[in-house]
Image (tube, rainbow, N blue to C red):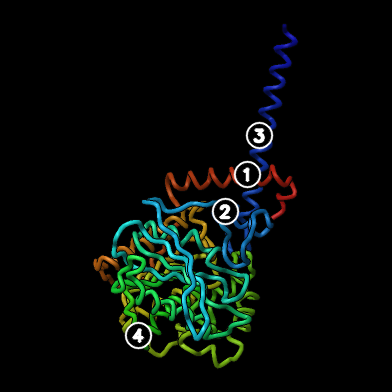
Amino acid sequence: MRWAKRILQNLVLLSSLTIAVVLISVAFAVYLWQSTDAGRLPAKTAVVLHAINNNLVTLDIDVRPPRIVSGGGGGSPLLREDLYVPVVGDVQVPVRIYRPQGEGPYPIIMYYHGGAFMEGYGSIETHDNIVRSLASRTESVVISVGYRVAPEHIFPAAVEDSYAALQWAERNAGSFNGDPDTISVAGDSAGGNIATVMTLMARDREGPEITSQVLFYPLTTFQDVDLRSREIYDSGYYLLSRQVMYRARDLYTPEEMMWSNPYTSPLQADNLSDLPPALIITAEFDPLRDEGEAYAKRLFESGVHVRATRYRGVMHGFVSFYEVMQSGRYGLQEASSFLRQAHGGVLQESPYQLQVRQSPQGIDRVREQAEAFAIAAYLLGRTGADLLTP
């Protein structure tokens, strides 16, 4: 029986060596993926970006992270309705409504999806997870607007559609148990631009009155402004490239005079006073970071109550990854809390300063690291050792 015992020992040793080699390979791969020209990334961010940039997950669009897994924000089940609403002339655009079950009336949030203002880069479908989660977390009616996009429809089609949908929501609030006196706007990237433009249009056109605005990493200017983040994170590796930004500008605003319009470039608007309280969330590794933060400062200087938070260690579009990235969950939680406070009339003003939120710490950091290595092991096992190249 000694030979059997020896074979068993050898098998255990071989298994241990195999596991050790796998762990070392995974650790080495993650280490390589964390190293970028713009700085060292947290493990989870590095793994997610590597998977996307090497086409290891299905992308819906180029500038927004894909829906990796499905999920909501907890709470009671929501009612969903898809319909079309009239905007300009005989034109109708799609909207998707998520609302709590019950009589309400519930606060209304108009959500404007990102996607560089261009066909094929974003839609109601690609941003469905954020919309559902906001509705669940805020106990609000959330209306996602499918505004028209370039190249077929240039400025101002997108903002006029979005404003018409805002007016429609106010007029028809009773049909979906919404409160017409409590309407907020929210959006990400290009949708963040549209969301804040809605506050300008509502002010300039005398309504509807907007309670608050939440802007996730918004584009705030089409002009050629010297912004450091546009220079150092413009490669596209962080999910938004200079090439895409220029293409969006050429297609959405083909005439240079459009770039200075306050409804395209609110950062350079002459008048930003009398706008609703704002929460602006930016990402460290994002070409739009600096203009979002500059816009927050301009709002504050114009007398608007502003909260601004930069999330460390994450990229453009990170909130869309809330199902797999803790920082995305933090961002969604912050936005939901801000909206609940605004809707309840309990927002407390405080001196403005940019808050910098660190990467997950403590148990959340341990969980992020473990999940990052697990995902990396899966990717390596599925595609082979060629993934070791950065």
Mark nearer the N terminus (1 vs 2): 1
Dot 3 alpha-carbon crowd within 10 angstroms: few under 14, some 14 to 19, many 20 or more: few
| Mark closer to the observer (1, 4) | 4
54 lies left or right of 106:
right
Gap in Å between the C-alphas at discs 1 and 2? 23 Å
* Callouts 1 and 3 close, C-beta under 8 Å: no
In the image, residue 242 lies at what x, y percent?
Answer: 62, 75
Q: Which numbered disc, 1 or 4, marks the residue that appears first in the sequence? A: 1
Residue 217 seen in render? no
Q: Is residue 293 above or below residue 43?
A: below
Q: Which residue is mark 3?
A: 20
Q: Amino acid at mark 2?
A: Ile
Give the label on residue 68, or none: 2
Q: Residue furthest top?
A: 1
* Horizontal and vertical percent position of residue 56: 67, 53
Neighbour class for label 2 at 10 Å: few (<14), some, many (≥20)? Answer: some
The foreground one among 248 and 366 is 248
